Amino acid sequence: MSYQAITQQIVDYFKTQPVVKAWIFGSYARGEQTENSDIDILIQPEQSVGLFKLSGMHLDLQDLLHIDVDLVTVKGLLPFARKSADRDKILIYERTS
């Protein structure tokens, strides 16, 4: 599946979820992905989103994309990973209303 097809599926999915913003980072953002790469997705969820909902979104995305997904929230991103994510993240979704 192409990068554009993957990002479009993610965007369409997040339109139905309590997500304010979403970015891709890691190998997909750098254009270095291989057939064995997972896709790293950083999200800013609504305030009220709990762990159960986040886990459900993670599983939904894996089922939708048929690839491993690493889904992490802005607040859940560990400090050592933040610099790397900030360096190559690409905004793919932002709620407009």
Image: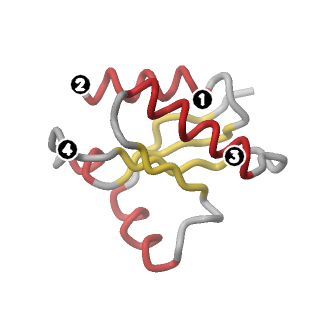
Left or right of 6 in this view: 62:
right
Q: Is residue 43 shown left or right of residue 80?
A: right
- Give how far apart the Cα atoms at labels 3 and 4 are: 27 Å
Q: How crowded is mark 2: few (under 14 residues within 10 Å), some or many (20 or more)?
A: few
Q: Which mark is residue 14?
A: 1
Measure the C-alpha gap from mark 2 to mark 4. 14 Å
Q: State the mark number for residue 88.
A: none
Specify the label residue 36 is tagged with: 4
- Image quadrant holding the N terminus, namely top left
Counting residues from the start of the chain, the first of labels 3 and 1 encountered is: 1
Q: Name the residue under label 3.
A: 45
Q: x and y percent of residue 32 in the render?
A: 16, 49
Cα–Cα gap, marks 3 and 1: 10 Å
Q: Alpha-carbon distance for marks 2 and 1?
A: 19 Å
In the image, farthest residue toward the bottom:
80
Query: In the rendered image, which quarter is residue 76 located in?
Result: bottom right
Between discs 1 and 4, the one toward the N terminus: 1
Figure check: 17 above or below 72 = above
The mark that comes first in sequence, 3 or 4, is 4
State which mark lies toward you, 2 or 4. Answer: 4
Q: Specify the amino acid type for callout 2.
A: Ser
Residue name at image x 65 percent, y 64 percent: 75
Q: Where is residue 46 in the image (x, y as percent from the top left)?
A: 76, 44
Question: Which label number is shown at residue 2?
Answer: 2
Q: Kindly state the secondary structure of the residue where label 2 is placed.
A: loop
SS assignment at label 1: helix
Point 35% across, 44% down: residue: 39
For the residue labelled by badge 4, is the local secondary structure a helix, a strand or a loop? loop
Q: How far apart are marks 1 and 4 (CA)?
A: 24 Å
